[in-house]
Image (tube, rainbow, N blue to C red):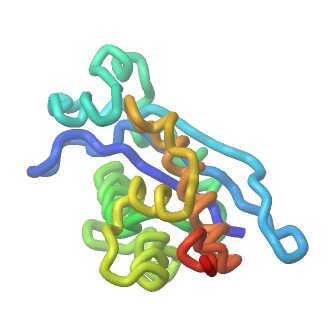
């Protein structure tokens, strides 16, 4: 079943020695007509690169937090084992796909330009959001607000597993057709 993932990256712009600094994955299991959250997996990753101050503000992850963290090649097997061959649900999947493909190529596990994680393996909640709410903002925050999902834990900083959890909640609501109050009839 789909694994939700969210990946935090290092600085914007030019590719650094490593770009992933945190990975959070949550397994969704089909249960009857619905879904339930199952296993989770997360890791912080030392990118061997400086962190941009904006990234620190958003994620709350400081260079000292990553000093003793493993490098991507050290977590790659565990990540692949967790993900298996499942479909992957992500918000703005292109980011996660690009980051993963880059890191697997960087550590020699795939050829540069290869799609270790091709687009057809992803279900994108941002695309689902645009279909459900045409013209509305596609951000995860805006989607959570439209679906009445509590994102208060995300106000200070947002970590990868928290974002994966919110993405899971958004996916389940939209997959089940529960798009919130806009469907309500007011008299």
Which residue is found at the position 43% from the left and 79% from the top? 133
Q: Position of residue 31 (x, y in %)?
A: 87, 68
8, above or below 81, in the image: above
In the rendered image, the residue lying farthest to the right is 32
> In this orientation, which residue lies closer to the viewer: 19 or 24?
24
Q: Position of residue 126 (x, y in %)?
A: 41, 71
In the rendered image, the residue lying farthest to the front is 187
Residue 53, picture quadrant? top left
Number of numbered tags placed on the structure image: 0
> In this orientation, which residue lies closer to the viewer: 31 or 142?
142
Q: Give the quadrant of the C terminus.
A: bottom right
Which residue is found at the position 40% from the left and 67% from the top? 93
Which residue is found at the position 51% from the left and 34% from the top? 153
Which residue is found at the position 9% from the left and 50% from the top? 14
> In this orientation, which residue lies closer to the viewer: 112 or 169?
169
Q: Position of residue 34 (x, y in %)?
A: 81, 70
Q: Give the quadrant of the N terminus.
A: bottom right
Q: Position of residue 7 (x, y in %)?
A: 41, 49
Residue 116, picture quadrant? bottom left
106, above or below 18, in the image: below
112, above or below 63, in the image: below
């Amino acid at each position: 079943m789909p694994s939700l993932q969210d990946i935090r990256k290092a600085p914007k712009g030019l590719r650094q020695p490593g770009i992933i600094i945190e990975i959070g994955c949550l397994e969704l299991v089909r249960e009857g007509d619905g879904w339930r959250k199952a296993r989770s997996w997360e890791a912080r990753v030392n990118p061997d690169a400086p962190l941009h101050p904006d990234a620190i503000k958003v994620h709350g992850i400081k260079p000292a937090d990553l000093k003793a963290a493993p490098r991507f090649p050290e977590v790659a097997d565990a990540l692949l084992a967790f993900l298996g061959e499942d479909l992957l649900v992500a918000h703005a999947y292109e980011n996660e796909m690009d980051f993963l493909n880059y890191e697997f190529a960087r550590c020699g596990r795939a050829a540069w330009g290869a799609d270790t994680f091709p687009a057809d393996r992803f279900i994108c909640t941002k695309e689902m959001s645009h279909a459900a709410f045409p013209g509305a903002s596609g951000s995860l925050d805006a989607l959570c607000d439209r679906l009445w999902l509590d994102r208060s834990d995300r106000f200070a900083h947002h970590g990868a597993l928290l974002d994966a959890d919110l993405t899971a909640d958004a996916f389940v609501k939209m997959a089940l057709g529960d798009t919130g109050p806009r469907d309500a009839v007011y008299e």
